[in-house]
Image (spheres, helix red, strand yellow):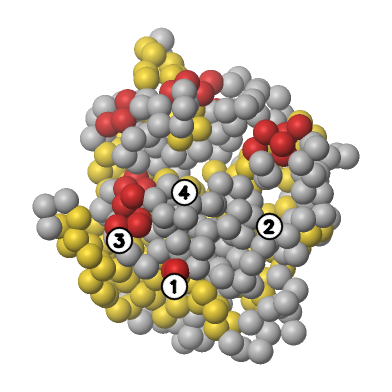
């Protein structure tokens, strides 16, 4: 089932709507046209009580003005580009630098701040098909990019996100979603007791601007080794240089074996108080794990007036390595005419009784 609700107006009175998807189990997901943002995911705990496990805002104004890209679709290029510069076929391009001297999450007005076109496909597994056209040269990226993102609420209590994009000129693409999770409920406090396991044998150290240094480092013997389950807080060691630079975890983790043809299980998160489990399946080679180190805005409280607090929510942004275009040996983010960018991420929810 899909229901549509008026959310507000922006610019010259342009109306913005939200869409709530519901399956037969009572799981609901709410999506906004603005930024294609995931506003709400309500799933049961071990006692069958449904709670909202993602951060978001009550007003459209907050989505427009707040930092953090909360819940939003990210593009054309997720994560960072060092100094906003890159070269394709000998031509240097400059993207808008909106993160100090670097480009972050698409530039000045990325996909996170666009109004997407929405088509509803109702049924037992309701879908929203979101489309957007980014014109040639927008934000310093060549080629007209046509993007389709399909949100599907599955009968198994999973949210599937499938991304596709085509271009008429050689360009770069790295799409993702910036949902913020706390499986105890978005207003339940710190995330340190969440038990996290990731099939990632390497990670990317960064400089002080959070741009990868170019090294792909083994996780062995570091706080970044989540190959066996452990709490997020166990090795949250700010004396570690990489964690100190970011104020916590804000790093690209490279999955063992890299990209796959079909989505495979890469991540599992368990919250012991609620019993909720979230498993992440993807075909992408990496994920940006962000522990909410900059969630501290007093001006933009979360839903219900709940204050922003550092390390109270986390992100798992499936993607290709950040700044790949500027590092030999990183992932390929180049998209040519005639090719289709494709990326699937599935967030599967369940409980441990």
Residue 158 rendering spot, x and y as whole percentages: 54, 71
How far, Cα to Cα, is label 3 from label 2? 31 Å
Q: Is residue 177 left or right of residue 109?
A: right
Residue at the spot of label 1: 304
Q: Which image quadrant: the N terminus?
A: bottom left
Q: Residue at x 58, y 21 (%)?
A: 327
Q: Residue at x 65, y 29 (%)?
A: 206
Of circles 3 and 1, which is in front? 1
> Can you say whether 111 is above or below 72 in the image?
above
How far, Cα to Cα, is label 4 from label 2? 23 Å
- Checking the image for residue 68, the label placed there is 4
Tell me which numbered mark, 3 or 1, is placed earlier along the sequence.
Answer: 3
Tell me which numbered mark, 2 or 1, is placed earlier along the sequence.
Answer: 2
- Give the secondary structure at mark 4: loop
Residue at the spot of label 2: 267
Residue 95 rendering spot, x and y as whole percentages: 37, 25
> Can you say whether 193 is above or below 330 in the image?
below
Q: Residue at x 53, y 21 (%)?
A: 326
Q: Residue at x 44, y 72 (%)?
A: 304
Residue at the spot of label 3: 60
């Amino acid at each position: 089932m899909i229901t549509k609700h008026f959310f507000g107006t922006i610019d010259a009175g342009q109306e913005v709507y939200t869409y709530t998807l519901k399956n037969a189990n009572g799981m609901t997901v709410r999506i906004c046209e603005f930024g294609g943002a995931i506003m709400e995911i309500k799933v049961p705990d071990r006692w069958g009580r449904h709670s909202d496990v993602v951060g978001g805002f009550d007003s459209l104004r907050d989505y427009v003005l707040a930092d953090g890209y909360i819940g939003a679709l990210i593009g054309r290029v997720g994560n960072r580009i060092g100094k906003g510069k890159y070269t394709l076929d000998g031509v240097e391009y400059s993207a808008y630098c909106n993160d100090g001297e670097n480009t972050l999450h698409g530039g000045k007005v990325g996909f996170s701040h666009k109004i997407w076109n929405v088509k509803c496909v109702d049924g037992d597994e309701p879908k929203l098909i979101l489309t957007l056209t980014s014109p040639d040269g927008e934000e310093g990226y060549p080629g007209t990019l046509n993007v389709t993102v399909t949100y599907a609420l599955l009968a198994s209590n999973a949210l599937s996100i499938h991304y596709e994009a085509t271009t008429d000129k050689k360009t770069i693409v790295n799409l993702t979603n910036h949902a913020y999770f706390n499986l105890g409920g978005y207003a339940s406090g710190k995330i340190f007791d969440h038990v996290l396991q990731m099939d990632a044998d390497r990670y990317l150290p960064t400089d002080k601007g959070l741009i990868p240094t170019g090294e792909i480092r083994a996780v062995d013997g570091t706080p970044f080794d989540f190959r066996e389950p452990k709490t997020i807080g166990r090795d949250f060691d700010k004396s570690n240089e990489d964690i100190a630079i970011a104020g916590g975890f804000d790093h690209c983790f490279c999955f063992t074996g890299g990209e796959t043809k079909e989505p495979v299980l890469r991540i599992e998160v368990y919250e012991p108080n609620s019993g909720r489990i979230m498993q992440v399946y993807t075909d992408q080679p990496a994920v940006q794990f962000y522990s909410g180190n900059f969630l501290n805005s007093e001006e933009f409280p979360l839903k219900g007036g709940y204050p922003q607090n550092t390390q109270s929510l986390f992100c798992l942004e499936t993607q290709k390595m950040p700044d790949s275009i500027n590092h030999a040996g990183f992932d390929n983010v180049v998209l040519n005419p005639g090719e289709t960018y494709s990326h699937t991420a599935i967030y599967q929810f369940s409980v441990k009784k």
